[in-house]
Image (cartoon, grey):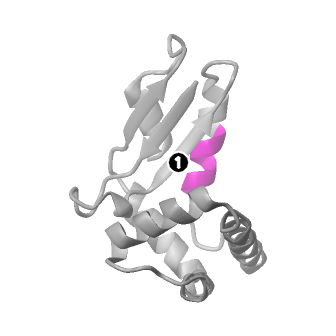
């Protein structure tokens, strides 16, 4: 089963501004997994919950992942298309890395607070969903 949580958009015509959290499970829906994901997402809204070391590690992992993916033709084609739709131009990796490096702890906290402060999330589930908790329960996890 796959569950995607999406926070409200600033502009419903621009999907690139969505904040997505994706949870996949081969064994069906386990509410405990949703609770763990929600707790980690909520943690980003709290001051001091994310440390500088954690942010540096995340930036390094993201840049390494992007570099590895840029070695495949299909990813490069998808990346170019996404960038043209989002920015109207191809963004070179150097600029992308500079943008990643510019992210601060305050950026993460303020973005998480904007996305999850008292707002409902959209939930989509695919697969064996007979044990999926109801929407109010899922939405309550992120408030």
Instruction: Residue at 66%, 28% (x, y): give it.
Output: 25
The magenta region covers 36-42
Camera sees residue 45: no
Q: Quadrant of residue 46?
A: bottom right
Instruction: Residue at 62%, 33% (x, y): give it.
Output: 24
Instruction: Residue at 60%, 26% (x, y): give it.
Output: 31
- Magenta span dominant secondary structure: helix
Q: How many marks?
A: 1
Which is nearer the eye, 47 or 129?
129
Q: Quadrant of residue 58?
A: bottom right
Image x and y of residue 32, in percent: 66, 29
At mark 1, the secondary structure is strand
Looking at this view, name the residue that lies furthest to the front.
73
Image x and y of residue 30, in percent: 64, 23
Seen in the picture, residue 46 relative to 6 is either above or below; the reply is below
Looking at this view, name the residue that lies furthest to the top.
130
Residue 29 on the magenta segment = no
Residue annotated with mark 1: 21
Horizontal relation, residue 42 to residue 72: left or right: left
Instruction: Residue at 50%, 39% (x, y): give it.
Output: 141
Seen in the picture, residue 99 relative to 109 is either above or below; the reply is below
């Amino acid at each position: 089963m796959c569950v995607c949580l999406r926070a409200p958009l600033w502009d419903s015509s621009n999907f690139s501004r969505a904040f997505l959290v994706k949870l996949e499970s081969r064994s069906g829906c386990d509410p405990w997994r949703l609770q763990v994901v929600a707790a980690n997402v909520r943690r980003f809204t709290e001051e001091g919950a994310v440390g500088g070391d954690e942010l540096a590690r995340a930036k390094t992992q993201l840049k390494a992942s992007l570099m590895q993916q840029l070695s495949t033709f299909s990813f490069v084609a998808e990346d170019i298309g996404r960038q043209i739709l989002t920015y109207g131009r191809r963004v070179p990796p150097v600029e992308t890395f500079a943008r990643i490096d510019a992210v601060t702890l305050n950026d993460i906290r303020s973005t998480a607070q904007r996305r999850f402060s008292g707002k409902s999330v959209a939930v989509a589930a695919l697969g064996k969903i007979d044990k999926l908790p109801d929407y109010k329960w899922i939405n309550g996890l992120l408030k």
